[in-house]
Amino acid sequence: PESKLPSLGTTIFTRMSALAQQHNAINLSQGFPDFDGPRYLQERLAYHVAQGANQYAPMTGVQPLREAIADKTAALYGHYPDPTSDITVTAGATEALYAAITALVRPGDEVICFDPSYDSYAPAVQLAGGVLKRQALQPPHFRVDWAHFASLLSERTRLVILNTPHNPSATVWQKEDFAALWQAIAEREIYVLSDEVYEHICFAKEGHASVLAHPQLRERAIAVSSFGKTFHMTGWKVGYCVAPAAISAELRKVHQYLTFAVNTPAQLAIADMLRSQPAHYRELPAFYQDRRDRFVQALANSRFEILPCEGTYFLLADYSAISDMDDVSFCQWLTTEVGVAAIPLSVFCADPFPHKLIRLCFAKQEATLLAAAEKLAAI
Ligand code: PMP
Ligand code: GLN
C-alpha cells in the first residue's frame, strides 16, 4: 500500500536493542531497567488475578486507581483532579500521547514541539494531518528561547508538546518556563500536552515542575505519566493522563476505540502500590541519583565528557575527544566493536544536529554500569 508515513522506519529503540542483542553488547540504549520492580506490586497483581479481576476494566480506568492518582496529584502539585471526569488510565504514556494528539489536532493545525523530541510525537501529529514546528534546543542546557518560541506562534497553532524531565537531554523545566509558556499562549486558544513520564525521577533542587501546578495552564493541559518508569515495570504498559473534563471527554472518544480499556489486575495492583507504598516514588530520586553518580564516577577517567543530568535515567555523553564519526555511526560502532549500546541524539531532531552526543541509560544494576563504564573508559 502507499505508505501514510513514508519516511518512517522502525524506532531507534527497537533497532539499537536488536543490535545490542545480536552483538552481545551491554544494552544502555533503549530505556528500561535491568532489575525488577517491587515484589509487593507483583504480589498484588497475582492477588487480583486470583480474585478473578480478569474482565474488562471501566473504559476510563478502575476507580481505586483513578482515586489514588487524584490523591497523589493533589499531594504533589496542589491540584485535585476529579477522578471521574479528569483522569484516564491508558496503555502506557504512548497511548495517552497518541490519544491526546488525535483528539486535539485537526488537519492543518500547527503543533510546536522542542527538539530533541521523543520520537512518538511527530508521527501522531502527521497522521492527524497537523503540521509540526520544531524548535531546536542547544546543548548543554537545552533551554527554551521564549522570544523565538513566540515567533513560531500563529493563528493556526493548536498544541504545544513539552517533556520534563526531558528524554533525551536529562534537563528539566523550571516554574519560570511554565510561566513564560503561559504568557506566550494566554491570549490564544492553544492547548498543552505535557509529557511528564519521569516526574518521579527528578534530581533538581526545586523538584519536578508540573504543568498541573500552574493554575491557568492546567485548564488547557493534558499531563501524561507512566507507571512503567515509576515502578520499574516498563513491560506493564500502564500510564495515565490528567486533563480538565472537557478535554478529557474528547481524549476518551479516541481512547475508547484505540484500546477501550487497560489491563484490569495491573491497574488494581498499581492502585494498591500507590496507596500503601508512597515511599517508593518519594525515594525514587535518591535511588536514581545514586546510580547516576556511581556511573558518572566510573566514567570519570574516560574520554567522554558527561553533561549535567537533572532528571530521567539517561545521561548524555560527548564523544568529540574520541571520534569524528556522526552519532549514528558512532553508536553502531560502539555497539558492535566496543560492546556497549547507546542512542544517538540526532534521531530526535528534524534539523541537522551536529553535536557529538550519545544517550546512555543508567537504569541498570551497579555491575552492569561498572562493566559498561570499563569498556567506555578503555576507548
Ligand atoms: N514519553 C517519554 C519521554 C518516554 O521516554 C517514554 C518511554 N520511555 C514514553 C513517553 C512512553 O511511555 P510508556 O512506556 O509508558 O508508553
Ligand atoms: N522511551 C524509551 C526510551 O526512550 C523507549 C520506549 C520504546 O522503546 N518505545 O528509551
Image (cartoon, rainbow, N blue to C red):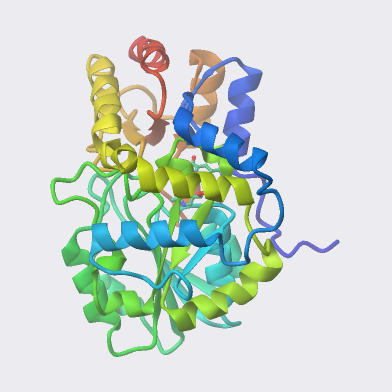
Residue situated in front as seen by the camera: 256 or 272: 272
Q: Is residue 322 left or right of residue 329?
A: left
Q: Quadrant of residue 225?
A: bottom left
- Residue 128 makes an appearance in the image: no
Q: Quadrant of residue 218?
A: bottom left
- Residue 159 makes an appearance in the image: yes
Quarter placement of the C terminus: top left
**Residue name at image x 28 percent, y 18 percent:** 299
Residue situated in front as seen by the camera: 216 or 112: 216
Residue situated in front as seen by the camera: 61 or 247: 61
Q: Of all residues shown, which one is farthest toward the right?
A: 1
Residue 217: where, in percent of width, then height?
Answer: 29, 76
Q: Of all residues shown, which one is farthest toward the front?
A: 51
Residue 76: where, in percent of width, then height?
Answer: 25, 57
Quarter placement of the N terminus: bottom right
Q: Is residue 265 left or right of residue 276?
A: right
Q: Indicate whether 259 appears above or below 179.
A: above
Residue 283: where, in percent of width, then height?
Answer: 26, 36
Q: Of all residues shown, which one is farthest toward the left?
A: 205
Q: Is residue 260 left or right of residue 360?
A: right
Q: Indicate whether 322 appears above or below 63.
A: above
**Count of marks, rendered view:** 0
**Residue name at image x 61 percent, y 46 percent:** 265
Residue 36: where, in percent of width, then height?
Answer: 48, 26
